[in-house]
Image: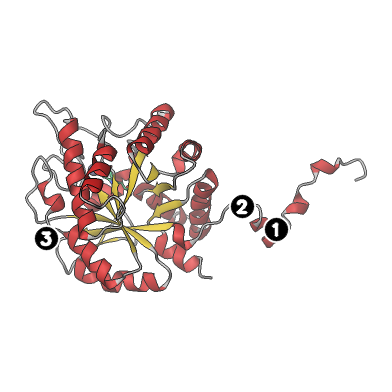
Amino acid sequence: MASMDIASILQGGYQHPLSRSWQARRHITKSMLMYPIFITDDPDAYVEIPSLPGQARWGVNKLEGFIGPLVQKGLQSVILFGVPLNCVKDDRGTPADDPSGPVILAIKKLRTLFPSLYIACDVCLCEYTSHGHCGVFRLDGSIDQEPSAARIAEVALAYAKAGAHCVAPSDMMDGRIKSIKRALIDAGYGNQCTLMSYSAKFASALYGPFRDAAGSAPAFGDRKCYQLPPQAKGLARRAIQRDVAEGADIVMVKPAMPYLDIIQDAAQLAPDHPLACYQVSGEYAMVVAGARAGVYDLRTMAFESVESMVRAGCTLILTYFTPQFLDWLSE
Ligand code: PBG
Ligand code: ZN
């Protein structure tokens, strides 16, 4: 023992649960959790989503019973995704800002029912376009940049006017952050609504269950011309810097766990902004499936997954585990 160098002994620093907890720079808290929820147009719907165990599509009339108990447990924010099943889709996603569509009705309902709940809205066209893509296309099948950014901005403004505290464009069209910020400012919502950009959104295999849930798989082709290639660290860094320059209030990395290096880069590139990451549907399904297969304990793995995101630098996590974390963080 006498021969052991003093600098070799680390275990004395984390021998107790409390001293272990002091090893974290920051801890996960309830206020960091944003819960993604799917709103459909049948007002009385409750339809479970088989590929996303424990998650469902909800009608607006069911929101009080669904969200009320979660607010009691400390839920502070949600992000809404529209899943219209009875609308006429077209090439510019006209139903996206239909004042009687499920998202706008849900914003108003939630604002009334739960005045303290922070309501973010995903903004995209893919749930509302006939082709299932996230932007407006030319006849030759290429993206039409200007109309795409303009249409996304129109939809974002409609959600802000309906009362959303935050609009979050997930479409990945070039120039949309600038158009949305401009539209919000020009309509007097510049200081009423947060703009959260899905900045580094990768073309991932992990969106499968979501497309199932939202019915938003593209009718042809894929999303590789607008979502980032998984290997693209440089493009991700450029996208983050661009969105900050265009007026994003929050930047996001998505998916989360396979992209922890990008989260760390974003924390360094945008140190003065909140940083979100999205533990997407496939990540959630993977954690649940592994637990069911006996690979690990669900709760231990769920914590390990989000704690790694916090360690990498995120300050906000969109996760389908939110209801479970509200319980676990209350113990
Ligand atoms: C669509 C959108 C997707 C997700 C959020 N918004 C899917 C996609 O881009 O194909 C994924 C969310 C998840 O998987 O949980 N704009
Ligand atoms: Zn989309």
- 117 or 68, which lies in front? 117
| Displayed quadrant of residue 179 | top left
Ligand 1 quadrant assignment: top left
Q: Identify whether 40 is placed above or below 186.
A: below
> For mark 3, what is the residue?
100
Residue 44: give x, y in percent of width and height: 17, 69
Residue 235: give x, y in percent of width and height: 38, 28
Circle nearer the N terminus (1, 2): 1
Mark 1: amino acid: Ser
Mark 3 or 1, which is nearer the eye?
A: 3
Residue 33: give x, y in percent of width and height: 42, 58
Q: What is the number of the mark on residue 24?
A: 2
| Displayed quadrant of residue 126 | top left
Mark 3: amino acid: Ser
Residue at 21% across, 40% down: 134
Mark 2: amino acid: Ala
Q: CA distance from mark 1 to mark 2?
A: 10 Å
Q: Label 2 CB, ligand 1: below 8 Å?
A: no
**Could you tell me if the residues under marks 2 and 3 are in contact, i.e. CB atoms within 8 Å?**
no
